Image (tube, rainbow, N blue to C red):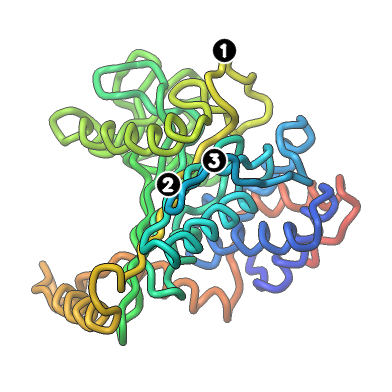
Amino acid sequence: MLVSYSTLFQFTKNTFLQMGCSEQHAQMATTVLLSADVRGIDSHGVARLSGYVRLWEAGRINATPNIRVVHETPSTAVVDGDAGLGLVVAPYAMNVAIQKAQQCGTGWVSVQNSNHFGIAGYHAMMALEYDMIGIAMTNASALVAPTFSIEKMLGTNPIAVAIPAGKQPPFVADFATTTASNGKLEILQRKNQAAPLGWVQTVNGEPTTDAAILKSGGAMLPLGSDREHGSHKGYALGSIVDIFSAVLSGASYGPWVPPFPAYVPMPENMPGKGLGHFFGAMRVDAFRPAEDFKHHMDNWIERFRNAKPVNEAQKVLIPGDPERELESIRMKSGIPLLEPVVNDLRNIAQKMNIDTGF
């Protein structure tokens, strides 16, 4: 089913309002959430809306948080999200990083006591309009086994970096530190399709293509899938995100990260508060004149676009190209929703006594 952006926006916003969010927070949360759908990252958009509702029903999301800075220096800060929606906490924290970069050249903010924040790329891209480089990271539910382990210790722990250019569109890299995100496994489950080898392992550490293996005690794999293909590098990247996002901020880390599914019990002896994020904003002109930098970014992008391809049918892409192309298409023609997602949204509408509009 294709649903227009405006229809989906109104329904999603009404859902957040029914949860008790303010008009401003509902607007922001909806904007961040739907940025995933329009950019083709269907795993992190409205498909997750029912998950936020269940967390709110379980008392794990505070719809009226007092988001605040609890520690700071001229260029750094720690933000306490007061158990609010990560979709609202994260933009607040990124704005703090941008304000500090405006004053000091760079700004760095770690966040404690938050929840799932949607796609990392949205928050990193907030820096672009200020001629800044944006960085965003978050830890997540422990679903990933470190190299050589069968125990789930890390999340998919994404990293996003957004870099401005001049005539060319910005460079936007947004990727999980696992072979694939958990959301992609969920999409395969909705389609009753198998997972590629290298995405997941069984409870005993054996390779499998079962997209639902996490429900049977299996684990996701770090980027690289196994030691011979570089999983130790994905493991290291996921660990860096966990440390920057949580050990640095005072959030919970490793196997103690609060799980996204509301029905999963909270870990015992949690060492910190909620989920953690990490944001950075770097003013380009703190390094060189912004116009010079953007001119050379254009040159960099154009040269990579013109790299000789393996075959003429497939041109070399720049990070951010596929998402930007899909955004242009989906804002005009609508957002495709799988039947299980449509059913989920209609269940929310019935529960919240609101109209889906579709």
Q: State the separation of the CA atoms marked 1 and 2.
A: 24 Å
Q: Which residue is mark 2?
A: 137
Question: Could you say where residue 271 lies in the image, as x and y percent from the top left?
Answer: 53, 19
Does the rendering let one see residue 314?
yes
Q: Residue at x 57, y 77 (%)?
A: 331
The answer to whether 144 appears left or right of 17 in the picture is: left
The answer to whether 251 appears left or right of 247 in the picture is: right
Q: Residue at x 21, y 71 (%)?
A: 314
Amino acid type at circle 2 is Met
Q: Nearer the viewer, residue 336 or 86?
A: 86
Question: Could you say where residue 309 lies in the image, as x and y percent from the top left?
Answer: 12, 71
Q: Which mark is residue 71?
A: 3
**Image quadrant assignment for residue 58:** top right
Q: Which mark is residue 201?
A: none
Label 3, residues with CA under 10 Å away: few <14, some 14-19, many ≥20: few
Q: Which label's residue is closer to the chain start, 1 or 3?
A: 3
**Image quadrant assignment for residue 133:** bottom left
Question: Could you say where residue 249 lies in the image, as x and y percent from the top left?
Answer: 48, 35
* Circle 3: element type: strand
**Image quadrant assignment for residue 146:** top left
Q: Residue at x 39, y 38 (%)?
A: 244
Question: How many labels were placed on the picture?
Answer: 3
Q: Which residue is mark 1?
A: 269
Question: Could you say where residue 53 lies in the image, as x and y percent from the top left?
Answer: 74, 42
Position of the C terminus, as image quadrant, is bottom right
The answer to whether 227 appears left or right of 269 in the picture is: left
